[in-house]
Image: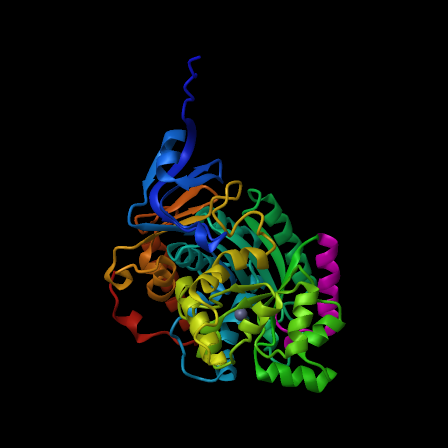
Amino acid sequence: MEQTPTLPQEIDILIEHGVVIPMDEPEHILYDGSVAVHAGRILAVGPAEELAGRFAPQKRIDARKRAVLPGFVDTHHHCLQNLLKGSRDDCTLADWIDSVSAPRIVMAVGDYLRGNYELQYHATRVGCAEALRSGITTLLNMEWATDPSLLDIYEEAGIRAIHTLTMTDYDQWNRPGMIMPLDKAYALAEALIARAQAAKEGMIYFRYGLACPNSCTTELMQEVRRRATEQGVAIHIHIAETEFEWNNIHNRYGKTPVQYLRDIGLLGPDVLGAHCIWLNEEDIRILRDTGTSVAHCPECNMKIADGAAPIAEMLAAGVTVSLATDSCAVNDNMDMFEAARVAAFLQKLRMKEACVLPAYQALELANVGGARALGLEQEIGTLTPGKRADIILVDLTAPHLRPINNIVNNLVYCASAPHDVVTVIVDGRLVVEDGGLLTMDVEEVYSAAERYIVRRFSEAGLYVSPYYRFQRD
Ligand SMILES: [Zn+2]
């Protein structure tokens, strides 16, 4: 009997002939692989020859001499600080907070309360532009006062976002102008939750952000915990970032920050803690037992000399660890290959053991680790049929990547995300092609932000680089 020929299935995108690294199992690398994308999701991953016969794509992406990976998941970032790159470096954290960070947070909160959203507008635009150009497809942006209308920027840029509203009510570490009145903060949180829910499903999430145990009262943290549970939203918080915080919490409550947060009922599987440097063995067990996840920010921790987080011990204990860039003022980029590389270097040095945190495991922190930490592992983090199509293509032809003796080692130890990531797809939408951002005019985004910085920071008596005095359009 003659077989009826099956017509190829019509799909949106077929990425063909790449080195496909799905990040589900180390041995699943395909050296001539393809990925089929349709209706925002990954339809199939397999040998190029096999998929070529099955699908008729609207768009073909030639991935020869490209690595095809899940998009990066950056689990801790502050877009506001993208505006502060290089403004003051090589000083103590206390000095940096005082002279660089705090005046801008005061400005963000004050401007928001006056109905002027320009600062956060520019910050969110430059943050999204740099993130996407660096292959970050999911970004946790821990911000101060951001009007809900600014969440439109995530949609226009085409990035998956976890928007986090930072809350604080204790002035030991804060200037008075950094603290938004709590009734206004809770009202804003409600509006942000509604705005996130109105977005295309799975594209924008909201989290409550608690600044840190040092700068929030127990009452605030317990009220946020109560609201988060009731509203079904998650929580993000800086935990045990500095020795200063550890000492303060220990002096105040006679416990470590992690023990204190457990005892007040804050920790849980919906809590993501940034940094988690100053931990003892019991703290690590508490994070594991409560299901609390960690956002590791190695470059920031090194630059401001906070310390080295016990990532090797956390991973061995079964704590969910993800990777993050933290801030362009203390990093100073959004390069997740570099973050993975530095994370590996730092653990090797800490443990005095070169086998610790090998390249594949370091790369896992940057995609699948982030997905797990955010509770999104069913949706993103690996190239698996059925998951959302968040995919990056990395050009393998530049001299700094060659020769390619081991594809994963070369990516982790040689690649530069902003330079080498050439194609980015988020939720099935092509947002970066041939290294160019399709959804935003990058030059317009940056020149508008720079014009704003010069004007607004000068008005406020804040430092403006002499560089801008000599620039002509
Ligand atoms: Zn932070």
Apparent side of residue 131 relative to residue 396 in the rendered image (left or right) = right
Apparent side of residue 172 relative to residue 434 in the rendered image (left or right) = right
Prevailing SS of the magenta stretch: helix
The residue that appears at 60% across and 44% down in the rendered structure is: 198
The residue that appears at 43% across and 16% down in the rendered structure is: 4
Quadrant hosting residue 348:
bottom left
Where's the N terminus, which quadrant? top left
Q: Nearer the viewer, residue 352 or 350?
A: 352
Q: Position of residue 363 (x, y in %)?
A: 45, 61
The residue that appears at 55% across and 59% down in the rendered structure is: 146
Count every numbered label the image shows and give the total: 0
Q: Is residue 453 magenta?
A: no
Q: Nearer the viewer, residue 121 or 165?
A: 165
Q: Nearer the viewer, residue 389 or 87?
A: 389
Q: Is residue 220 above or below residue 245?
A: above
Q: Is residue 223 magenta?
A: yes
Q: Position of residue 209 (x, y in %)?
A: 62, 64
Quadrant hosting residue 338:
bottom left
Q: Position of residue 139 (x, y in %)?
A: 50, 57
- Residue lying at the far front in this picture: please name it: 1
Q: Position of residue 439 (x, y in %)?
A: 39, 46
- Specify start and end residues of the magenta stretch as a single range: 211-231
User: Is the image coloured rainbow, by chain, by secondary structure, or in one colour?
Assistant: rainbow
Quadrant hosting residue 235:
bottom right
Q: Nearer the viewer, residue 250 or 116?
A: 250
In this rendering, does residue 304 appear at all? no
In this rendering, does residue 90 appear at all? yes
Q: Is residue 147 above or below residue 250?
A: above
Where's the C terminus, which quadrant? bottom left
